[in-house]
Image (spheres, grey):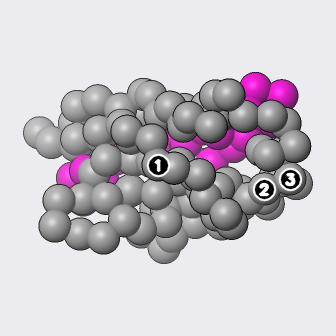
């Protein structure tokens, strides 16, 4: 399985981005039943979970992004999305997705930079 994250970029504070992550070369049975998560890693920091979504669509968020980020998934496309609104400079990081349980090899991630 190859995880391919897309959608990052350089934005100003208060703007929005939508990230996508496709689990290419996976089969539906290795994607659909699993809880997926978006993670981020800022320079000098450990990777942290920012949002999770179960196979049934139940979501959970880190306090730092609650009310601003929305995670969703399209099981038929084996894709997870992260809508990020009202971005702040502290959201600057490389963003990754993966299964929470029995994670696959990490993808390259997508860089999000929030700066004025």
Residue at the disc numbered 1 = 106
Say which residue appears at 77% left-offset and 44% top-offset: 31
Q: Nearer the viewer, residue 107 or 95?
A: 107
Residue at the disc numbered 2 = 34
Q: Nearer the viewer, residue 61 or 40?
A: 40
Kindly report the distance in space between the C-alpha atoms of the residues bearing marks 2 and 3.
4 Å
Contact between labelled residues 3 and 1, with CB atoms less than 8 Å apart: no
> Where is the N terminus found, in terms of image quarters?
top right
Which of the two discs, 2 and 1, sits closer to the camera?
A: 1
Residue at the disc numbered 3 = 33
Span of residues in magenta: 71-92
Residue 79 is one of the magenta-drawn residues: yes
Percent position (x, y) of residue 50?
49, 62
Instruction: Tell me which corner region of the image, top left, top right, bottom left or bottom right, holds residue 102.
Output: bottom right
The answer to which of marks 2 and 1 sits earlier in the sequence is: 2
Percent position (x, y) of residue 60?
66, 66
Vertical comparison of 14 with 59: above or below: above
Vertical comparison of 93 with 81: above or below: below
Kindly report the distance in space between the C-alpha atoms of the residues bearing marks 1 and 3.
19 Å
The answer to which of marks 1 and 3 sits earlier in the sequence is: 3
């Amino acid at each position: 399985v190859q995880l391919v994250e897309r959608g990052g970029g350089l934005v100003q504070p208060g703007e929005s981005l939508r990230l996508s992550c496709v689990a290419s070369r996976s089969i539906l049975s290795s994607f659909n039943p699993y809880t997926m998560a978006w993670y981020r890693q800022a320079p000098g920091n450990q990777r942290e979970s920012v949002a999770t979504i179960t196979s049934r669509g139940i979501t959970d968020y880190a306090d730092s992004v609650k009310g601003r980020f929305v995670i969703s998934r399209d099981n038929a496309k084996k894709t997870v999305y992260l809508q990020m609104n009202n971005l702040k400079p502290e959201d600057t990081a490389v963003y990754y997705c993966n299964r929470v349980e029995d994670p696959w090899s990490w993808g390259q991630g997508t860089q999000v930079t929030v700066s004025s």
